[in-house]
Amino acid sequence: MWTKQRRKTNRGRVIVPLLAAMFFAYFGFHAYHGEYGLYSAIKLQEQTKLLQAQLDAVTASRTELERQVQLMHDGTIERDMLDEQARKALNVSRPDEVTIMRGSGDLAIN
């Protein structure tokens, strides 16, 4: 009967920790950069803030339009509003008036 005695090599001691390190590196990378990872969550929060700001702007614009429609809806249009809308549509002003042109992106402060 023949028996072989082997000495333990350093390779055998390194294989399991190396495989464990690769396993943790793989899942760690995807925990940060993956579709549902930490980086994606941060980008999603930034996009949520941006869309919330856009929603607030659109809501303010709609409220202003609803206010203007309400002024015209009851059948009696206010003289000032009629004058303002006519001047804006015709691009006309009186000689003694000062005209301040605002861009379409400017919001009116009430």
Image: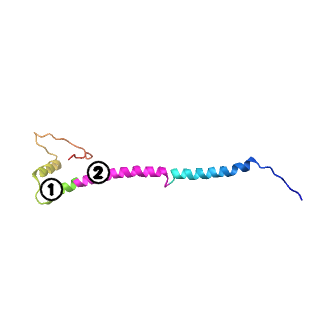
Q: Residues within 10 Å of mark 2 (few under 14, many from 20)?
A: few
Q: What kind of secondary structure does the magenta stretch mostly adopt? A: helix
33 or 1, which is in the foreground?
1
Q: Residue at x 15, y 59 (%)?
A: 73
Nearer-the-camera pick, 37 or 83? 37
- N-terminal of the two: label 1 or label 2? 2
Residue 66: x, y in percent? 21, 56
Q: Is residue 42 left or right of residue 25?
A: left
Residue at image location 13% in from the left, 43% down from the top: 93
State whether residue 73 is above or below residue 46: below
Task: Examine the structure image and report whether residue 22 is included in the region drawn in magenta.
Answer: no
Q: Is residue 59 left or right of 10 when viewed as pictured?
A: left
Tell me if mark 1 has few (under 14), some (14-19) or many (20+) residues whose alpha carbon lies within 10 angstroms of its own.
some
Q: Position of residue 38 (x, y in %)?
A: 48, 51
| Residue 90 image label | none
Residue visible at 15% across and 56% down? Answer: 71
Q: Give coordinates of residue 86: x percent, y percent.
A: 14, 50
| Separation of residues labelled 1 and 2 (CA atoms) | 22 Å
| Residue located beneath label 2 in the image | 57
Q: Secondary structure at mark 1?
A: helix
Q: Residue sitting at 44 percent across and 50 percent down?
A: 43
Report which residue position mark 1 lands on.
71
Looking at the rendered structure, the secondary structure element under dot 2 is: helix
The quarter of the image holding the N terminus is bottom right
| Left or right of residue 93: residue 21 | right
Q: Is residue 42 magenta?
A: yes
Disc 1 marks which amino acid? Leu
State which region is magenta: 35-63
Tag 2: residue type? Answer: Ala
